[in-house]
Amino acid sequence: MSRRIRRIAAWVTGAVIVGGLALVGVGVWQVLAPGTATASGPERRVVERVAEQLPAAPAAPPTRLEIPALDFEAPVATMSSEGQSILNPPTASDAYWLSDFGKPGVGTDNTVYVIGHASADQRAVFDPLVDRAAGRSSVLPGDEIIVRTETGAVVYEVVSTERREQSALAEWELLWSNVPGRLVLITCLFDATGSTVSDNVVVFARQQESSAEAVPST
C-alpha cells in the first residue's frame, strides 16, 4: 500500500492522529446535534432494473448518485486528497468523489470512490445508506446504483457490503486495491441511539456489462 493510500485510508478510519495531524473521518458530523435519531433504515421498494436500458457512457466525473431500491438520490461533488492534511467532506448534504482515483464509465482505470457523511440526527447525505437497528448497510447485494456523469449514466450492481472497525480500515488491502470498473461507497455507522460512531460501512459494486466490460467481483 502506497504512502498516499495509507494517508487516505487513515482518514476514513475516524478521528486518528498521524504525524501530529488530525485526520477527520467520514461520518463524524454533528455527533452531538440535538434531535431524535431514526434507528432503522429507509423503506425498500421493488424497482425495474435499468442496466440494459442505458447506453454505455465514456469515463467522466460523476455528478449524481441514485439507488432506486432505496428511492435515494444525492448530488456528487468533487474533492482531491492531494496536498490535504485534513480530509473531511466540506458539506453534509453532498456525496464526494475522490478525484485522485477512477472515473465511472467505459475506459476507467481504477476503483471509483464516493464518500459521504452520516450524522447523529439524520440530516447527512448517507444516512439512508445505513440501518442502525440492524447494524448494517441498507444497500443490499443485487441493488443497482446509478452514477450520473457528464457523459451519461453508469450502472453498478452491489456485490457485497462490509462493516469494519474503524481502526482496521487503513490496512484493508482489498478496499484500496486498483480494480477498474468497481465502485466503493464509504460512510460511518452510528449506533441506534445516534450518539456513537462505531464502525465504517463499505459498499462494493461492480459496473454492469451493458455499460462496460465485465470486471472482477470483490
Image: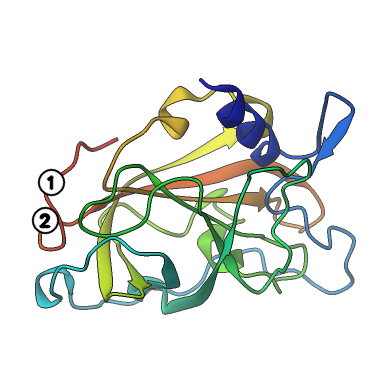
From the top left corner, tell me how far across and down residue 72 is, in percent. 45, 76
Label 1 or label 2, whichever comes before in sequence order: 2
Left or right, residue 20 beside residue 48? right
Q: In which quarter of the image is residue 111?
A: top left
- Residue 169 visible, this orientation: no
Most extreme residue toward the front is 83
Note whether 8 is above or below 75 in the view shown: above
- Residue 209 visible, this orientation: yes
Tell me the element at label 2: loop
Question: Are the two marked residues, 1 and 2, in contact with CB atoms closer than 8 angstroms?
Answer: yes
- Label number found at residue 209: 2
Residue picked out by circle 1: 214
Residue type at mark 2: give it: Glu
From the top left corner, tell me how far across and down residue 21 is, in percent. 86, 33
Q: How crowded is mark 1: few (under 14 residues within 10 Å), some or many (20 or more)?
A: some
Note whether 46 is above or below 3 in the view shown: below
Taking the spot 15% from the left edge, 76% from the top edge, the residue there is: 54
- Label number found at residue 117: none
Taking the spot 39% from the left edge, 48% from the top edge, the residue there is: 102
Tell me the element at label 1: loop
Residue type at mark 1: give it: Ala
Q: Distance between the residues labelled 1 and 2?
A: 5 Å
Taking the spot 27% from the left edge, 59% from the top edge, the residue there is: 156
- Report the number of numbered marks: 2
Q: Which of 137 and 58 is in front in this view?
A: 58
